Image: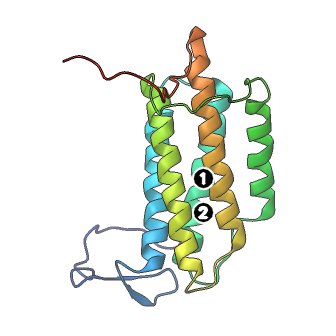
């Protein structure tokens, strides 16, 4: 690694601009900064998920995902740079297929609820969907590697499947949305 941060604050961002990985300046609320900032947020939420009690293979997969997301943030921070390759999207699809294979087909909508692990997994899924929307927004004004959007799309699906797996862990079940329910008495 060529650059090390010896001083955390520089005061250079105090006027609402930041430098991208190529050295150019951009507003802190630009599409690009929003995109890689949301990917960073997603990585943090996945870290919260990994702090829960998870099956070993799920933990290992999420560790790999965190590295991919860090690479993705770097890619989004450097215009024209590409790191997320189709192989990473294909890997996600294999992980998704493996974990989804034993789940029953969905017949009802499920609520993002249950154990702490299930709830944090759903939070990660929703942040992932937002990251995907931010990257799509960026792609409308600047060129973006299409594998980034595909990766985030598959990752949100994987997080949904992980939530389903976790809900069934230790004999548990998913919390089903009930359309025709009575209001509770208070």
Residue lying farthest top? 171
Residue lying farthest left? 186
Q: Which residue is mark 2?
A: 71
Q: How many marks?
A: 2
| Residue 173 drawn at (x, y percent) | 56, 16
Q: Can residue 77 be seen at all in this image of the molecule?
A: yes
The quadrant in which residue 58 appears is top right
- Which quarter of the rendering shows the N terminus? bottom right
Q: Residue at x 60, y 48 (%)?
A: 156
| Residue 42 drawn at (x, y percent) | 48, 52
Q: Is residue 171 left or right of residue 41?
A: right
| Residue 18 drawn at (x, y percent) | 35, 81
Q: Which residue is mark 1?
A: 67
Q: Is residue 157 left or right of residue 77?
A: right
Q: With respect to residue 153, does 144 lie above or below?
A: below
Regarding mark 2 in the picture, which secondary structure is present there? helix
Crowding near the residue tagged with mark 2, few <14, some 14–19, many ≥20 C-alpha atoms within 10 Å: some
């Amino acid at each position: 690694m060529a650059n090390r941060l010896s001083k955390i604050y520089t005061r250079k961002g105090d006027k609402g601009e930041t430098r991208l990985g190529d050295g150019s300046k951009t507003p802190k609320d630009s599409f690009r900064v929003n995109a890689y900032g949301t990917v960073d947020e997603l990585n943090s939420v996945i870290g919260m998920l990994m702090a829960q009690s998870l099956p070993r293979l799920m933990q290992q997969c999420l560790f790999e995902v965190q590295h991919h997301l860090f690479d993705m943030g770097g890619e989004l921070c450097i215009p024209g740079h590409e790191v997320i390759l189709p192989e990473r999207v294909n890997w996600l699809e294999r992980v998704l297929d493996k974990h989804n294979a034993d789940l029953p087909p969905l017949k009802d909508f499920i609520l993002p609820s249950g154990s702490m692990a299930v709830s944090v997994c759903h939070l990660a899924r929703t942040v992932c969907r937002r990251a995907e929307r931010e990257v799509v927004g960026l792609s409308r004004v600047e060129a973006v590697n299409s594998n980034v959007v595909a990766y985030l799309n598959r990752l949100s699906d994987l997080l949904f499947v992980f939530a389903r797996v976790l809900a069934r862990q230790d004999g548990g079940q998913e919390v089903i949305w009930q359309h025709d329910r009575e209001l509770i008495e208070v």
